[in-house]
Each structure stands twice: as structure tokens, then as C-alpha cells.
Amino acid sequence: MAQMNENYLKLPGNYLFSEIARRVNEFKNNNPEANIIRLGIGDVTRPLPQAVVEAMKKAVDEMGQPETFRGYGPEQGYDFLLEKIVEHDFTSRGINISQDEVFVSDGAKSDTANFQELFGTGNILAVTDPVYPVYVDSNVMAGRTGFIKENNQFDKIVYLPCTEENGMKPSLPTGKIDMIYLCFPNNPTGMTLTKEELKKWVDYAREHKSIILFDAAYEAFIQEEGVPHSIFEIEGAREVAVEFRSFSKTAGFTGTRCAYTIVPKDVKVFDTKGEAHSLNPLWLRRQTTKFNGVSYPVQAGAAAVFSTEGQQQVKENITYYMENAKIILNGLKNAGYKVFGGTNAPYIWLKTPDNMGSWEFFDKLMHEANVVGTPGAGFGANGEGYFRLTAFGTRKNTEKAVERIITKM
Amino acid sequence: MAQMNENYLKLPGNYLFSEIARRVNEFKNNNPEANIIRLGIGDVTRPLPQAVVEAMKKAVDEMGQPETFRGYGPEQGYDFLLEKIVEHDFTSRGINISQDEVFVSDGAKSDTANFQELFGTGNILAVTDPVYPVYVDSNVMAGRTGFIKENNQFDKIVYLPCTEENGMKPSLPTGKIDMIYLCFPNNPTGMTLTKEELKKWVDYAREHKSIILFDAAYEAFIQEEGVPHSIFEIEGAREVAVEFRSFSKTAGFTGTRCAYTIVPKDVKVFDTKGEAHSLNPLWLRRQTTKFNGVSYPVQAGAAAVFSTEGQQQVKENITYYMENAKIILNGLKNAGYKVFGGTNAPYIWLKTPDNMGSWEFFDKLMHEANVVGTPGAGFGANGEGYFRLTAFGTRKNTEKAVERIITKM
């Protein structure tokens, strides 16, 4: 008799964004005339940069000719892309990362969800709260947690609250943590850490031989000087950190799918005898066994992001979105909302008025202003009473949404 | 201290195809002038059908315009593709599969490797021997097996020998098996089962409440009548089977990446209380949490495979490859080799002469004939003494390879 993975039974209902989609569809069916503006799921609206479009079409043409056709590529990505990633994202910032420390994939969601497979099920993990749900859910599925408690937190996970009181910056854990998920610029709060603040985490990890799983999917949105774009800007991080990067938000790849993960050879995990094993060959083994690389035309498109034209086009998009962020941030501030983020990240994290519940605010906003956002409670217990808006809408919709929030709520 | 997943330590050396690539590269470095013909890794050589190329380029153009840009798609695939899959592959064969039983993914390798996550670690699994290594390795990594034994088989896995004696057709297990991996047309032997033979497996699974993980990646190569293209042609299979399909070999997508998995709602797994849970929503939960869908241009290309032009172009490619298969099969037969497969599958499984070891034959073939194949031992203990050649080369190379094998070996 085939037994199920009972860890799945610990998961509450739907994945957050599926639940939002469900509610929106229901609302649309009942109100077909409503002009809904979506500032919820964190999906971009600007098209692919033309440099990417041209490169992808060229690559597709190559796939149609026997002389230039490409079959299976290297699971970890083509050299032409790895080279550009290393040069542009690391060497240019004085960071020493080699090509075989870069693993191209179909998405940071896949990578952040799959990476936990390399760890024993007995590890204790810490996440910030609020947090991107994938870090938690993937570990629940793997059996690294206990059951969910009344406050919607899982037993055996250490939650690091990000609250108004600590300015959305988590404190170091007091106990010993083995796996630490950090995301900066943060999803959902939009807040960042300084180099000094991030260094404390690296030092903690070095002291406790823990691993930091660092999600840098939003680094391209950093506007201010002194905010680290990569955890590898911090001394010693090569020994304790893995970094997730993505083309999704940076270059409009949410529907095109390409990301990459940096696994320095210095990062070690331990077996029960205390012997050290490098994570890099373990991830290579995982990827070569369970993944077959990213579509060649997609990788060709991703490489074009690093061309001169590509960089300029990407910069224009980011400027556009960050202008949206400013419009939301200032609009809500002026209307008396308490807001976080939006300066170095495409997310604005607002406190709901009158201590309204997150889902209540979600429903009210959808019904009265026809604006869809993401309920903070979906990101964790400490997200209750908060709400996330994204800067990824069109300018017109962003302005209209802010106006509606101010006038109708 | 971060503990590793120690199951990784049970895995022997490299993933099979990485090891082959390593040996070939070494040989090429030492013999730069050698004209190597690769009939090894199972990679196709015919370019993408023009219908696919056109559809992908159109989709890329859409991604470059704000009005037609697509961001995140549904994790399980776009309706326009699901519809075509259901209609073409199932409805047209009188099989009842609904759209929400189809899950589009980036590859059958990912799906066959990931699907085991839905099962408890206590399940007993059976695989044929020889077998596609991903089924085994992914279960080793998940801790569903013991250690590797001297004969290269893992403890706790039940191996079902496919030998010359049983005509490469596995016998039903004698004990109770929970998860059964079957692949027909088979990789690596190229052999198929009749409907009556496959029905015995479905009946076994229904009797024991086990699940059949059926890999049908090569169904498009079936030439003879009466060979089932889908396990769902068998009565009762909807209750016990999951089927993996792929565009890789069918339509030249090895470097473009698209596949799909059928999870009927009737298939149930059980919790420790004996309560039944449908696999379909569990896989949906897995995919929505850990995967973000296949690139839109790739899905558009996959949908074009089902167009009239696409179908014709795909058929031409398959005819071409199966003609190659015939050339290899007949050439080797005439030269006195004992050969299997090649009639309804793009693989030819040959017995090495004089009981030569598989890797020994690999090295000899590479050094003396400059032909690369796949050592049977890489597929399991019962593959020792066998060797796999693929029909995916060009016509010229295929003919040359056969000639070289006959004259130089």
C-alpha cells in the first residue's frame, strides 16, 4: 500500500498566491464589470527588453537549423551565460566567484524550494516573520518542521519577528540555528540591511557553522549607496552563504523563467561524524540528477540582459518601477498610512488602518477600491495587520490605485 | 552546525551521463583529431520543427510588447497547451483525461525525479534492472533506500531483472511493492509490453494499492499496432498510475525543455491511519509551491507540435530516427551481434561480444571506432555485459558508426 508523505498534511490550505488568485477570480465572476488593478502577486508588467527579445529569436532560429541546433545543455547553465553573470554581478563589485560556483535554473522559487534537500531533516531553521512562504512550505514538505500552531507558526522553526518596533530588521537568534533564510531587499517588507548589519549574520553563521540561504532576488532595485547587493560583499560569507538571484523582477522574466544560485566551494555542511562536505558538489549532484538545464533560447535571452543595450533597457524598467514605488509610498504616507520599504525594493509594506486584519483589508480593498494586494498574514504571524503592495504595475494603474485607496478606503 | 542530507553519501560517484561526458572530454583532449560519433546520451540531432520555431518567435515577440506581455503563468501550464495535450494524446485514443489532470513541466527528468516527494520514506519501490538511473538516484537522495551493495544495487529497492532469458520483460514482484517504476517503450532496452502484459501490472497495483510511475517518454516512436501508447489505455489504470510524457525526443525539445505528467484524480495514496488521499491535489500543491511554470515561449512552441504542420514535421523526424534504428539493428544483427529494441523505440540494446564488460566495451568502442555509446552497467547490475546505442544521430553518422563497429570491433 503506497504511503503518502504525511508532511503535506501539515500544510494549511492553499499556497498564498493560489488563494489570492481564487478570491480574485470569484470576485471577478460576481463583478464582471469591475476594473481590477493588481498590485498583489509581485508580477511585472513591463515587457521583455528588446535586446532580450532579439537574442531569444535568434536562438530560436538557431534551434531550427541542423548546424546550430542545440540538444541537452549543461545542467548548470551554458558558459556564455555563467561568464556574464560572474563578470557583471560579482567581479565588477570586487567579489571573487568562479564560474563553477554559479548554477543557472528556471527560477529562484525552484532553487529556494529545492536547496533544502541538501540538508538533514534534523536541522533547525530560522526564518524572518513575515517571510516568503516558499522557504517555510518547502521545509514543511521535507519534514524538517513540526505541526502548525494556533498562531500559524510551525513547531521546530525559529521565527525572527520583523516588527514596527525593530524597524523590520530581525534580531540574531538566541539559540543555535543550522539554516537561516534571509531575503534582502526583503520580500515582503521592502526593507534592507546595511553591510554592518549583514556582517553580524555572517559572523553568527561562522561561529555556529550554520548556513545562510540568502535571497537577493531584488538586489537590482537598490537605489542607495552602501546597501549590499550580494552577501558575498561581506567578509567570510563565502564560508557560510549561498545566494539566490533571479532575472524575474530585474529583467521581466517572470513568464520567461531564468535564475541562478551561487554556491561557493568554501561552504561546508557536516555529516554525523562531524566531517565537513562542500555544498557545491552536492548541489551539482542534485541538479545533474533532478534537473536538465534551462531552455537554450531563455539562456540566450538572459545573457542579453548583460549586453550594453540590455543593461540600459533593464535600468529604464527599474527606474520606472521605482518611480511607481515612490508614488505609492508618498501617496500613502500623505494619506496617513504607516509604510515601510519602497526605497530600495519594489515592495511597499503598509500597516492596515484601525488594526484591521490583513485578509479583511484584502477583501475590503478588492471590493471597495478594486485593488488587489497581498495580505501580510499570508507571510506569517507577524505580517498580520500589514499589507503588501508592489510597484510592478503600470504607471497609470499605480496612480489610479493610490488615488482609489486614498478616496475609497 | 548545519547537517547534510547523508543519503547523498550513498550515491556512487557521478551521475551516469556526467561520467560519460567526462571520459569523452578526456579522450578528445588526448585525441583532438579523432572524429567522434555520439550515439550515447540519447540526445536528438534533428532541429526543432519549423512550426515550433515560428510559434516560439511569435511568442517571444508578444513578450516584447506591453499589450501581449505575459508574466507568471499558471504553474501547471497554460490552458492552450493543456487542451491540445488532452485532445491529441488522450481523447483521440478514447482515453478520459481532464485538463486539471495534466501538469506541464520543464522536463520528464524533473518530474520523474520530483514525483517521489509525495510518498512516505517507508515505501518499498521496485525498478526494472536495467533502469533509467534518475528513478533510483532520486529515491536514494530522499532516503527511501539503504546502502549500495557490492552488485551496485541498493538495499531496500526491489530490482526486477530484464534479461535475455525473459526477453527483457520484467516479472511481477513476488512481495508487496508500494511504488513501481515502469518505462515502456523502455529506456535502455528499447523493448515494449503488450496491453495484456501491461494489464498484469495494473491488476497487481490495484490488488496491492500500489502506484505505478509510468514513463512514456518514448511512446511517439511506437511503430507496431497493439503496443499501448499510454498506460491509461489499460482498464483500471486511472486508479493506480501516473504517466510521464515529454516533448524532448518526440519534437526535439531536449534543449528547449517541456514535458508533462498525468495525475488522474482517482489515484490514491494512504496515510498511516489508512485514509486515502488523492495524488492530484498533492502534486498540484508541490508544483505551486516549488515550481513556477514553463517559459511562455516554450509552451507556445510545444502547443505548435500539435498543429497540422507540427504533427507532420514531427512525424518526419520520427520516421528519420526509426530508419536510423533499423540501420543499426540490421547492421549489428548481420554482424552477429545479439540485439534488442529498435523497433518501437529509438534505442538499440546490444549484448557485448565475448562477455566483455560494459565500460570495457565503452572504452574500446570509443578508442577503436571513435563511437560513443552508453555502457549497460550504468543502468544497473543486469545491464552489465550490455550496451545502448541511440537512433538519434544523423543518417550519415549512424551509417558510419555501424560500419566502424562492424569493421573495427
Image (cartoon, coloured by chain):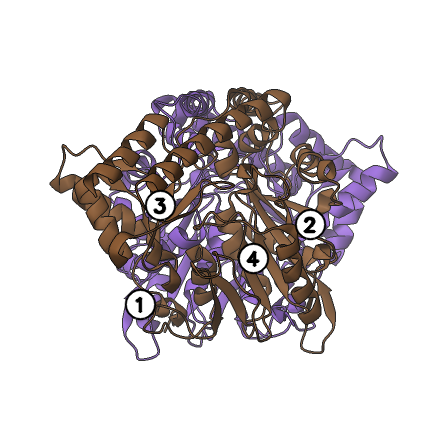
Chain colours: A purple, B brown
Whole-percent x and y of residue B366? 22, 43
Q: Which residue is mark 1?
A: A206
> B263 or B127: nearer the eye?
B127
Q: Residue at x 34, y 73 (%)?
A: A208
Tell me, yes or no, whether dots 4 and 2 are on the same chain.
yes
The residue labelled by disc 4 is B115
Pointer 2: what residue?
B232
Which image quadrant for residue A304?
Answer: top left
Residue B311 point in image, percent of width and height: 59, 26
Write down the residue under mark 3: A226
Question: Residue B71 location in percent, x, y?
Answer: 59, 34
Q: Is residue B55 above or below residue B405?
A: above
Task: State how far apart marks 1 and 2 are (Cα).
Answer: 53 Å
Tag 2's secondary structure?
Answer: helix
Residue B10 occupies which quadrant of the picture?
bottom left
Dot in front, 1 or 2: 2
Residue type for callout 1: Arg
